Amino acid sequence: MVRVPGGAVDDEIERRLLFEELRRVSEFAGLARSGGQIIETHMPLLRDYDLVHHLP
């Protein structure tokens, strides 16, 4: 997962970029044996950006 350095872009743009990354991570997690661990690892970041509700 790629994260934009703080202050590099507008907060809303950063959130949208993270949302798109979340979609890719979720797709991979759905195919991986360790899918639950993948999501759990990213959970703090998802909470920080209020994106938890977008999880499948």
Image (cartoon, rainbow, N blue to C red):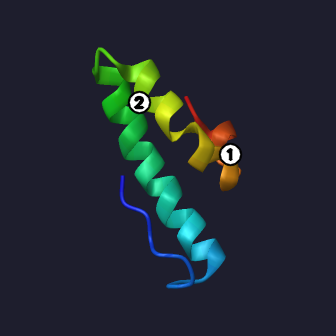
Element class at badge 1: helix
Query: Total label count?
Result: 2
Residue 31 x %, y %: 29, 22
Element class at badge 2: helix
Comparing 50 with 54, the one in front is 50
Comparing 40 with 30, the one in front is 40
Q: Which residue is the site of mark 1?
A: 47
Q: For the C terminus, give its image quadrant.
A: top right
Residue 2 x %, y %: 36, 60
Tell me which numbered mark, 2 or 1, is placed earlier along the sequence. Answer: 2
Location of residue 48 with respect to 36 vertically, above or below? below
Residue 40 x %, y %: 52, 29
Q: Which residue is the site of mark 2?
A: 38
Q: Residues within 10 Å of mark 2 (few under 14, many from 20)?
A: some
Location of residue 31 with respect to 13 vertically, above or below? above
Which amino acid type is marked by label 1? Arg
Image point (57%, 84%), residue name: 7
- Mark 2–mark 1 Cα distance, whole angstroms, equals 15 Å
Which amino acid type is marked by label 2? Ile
Image point (69%, 38%), residue name: 53
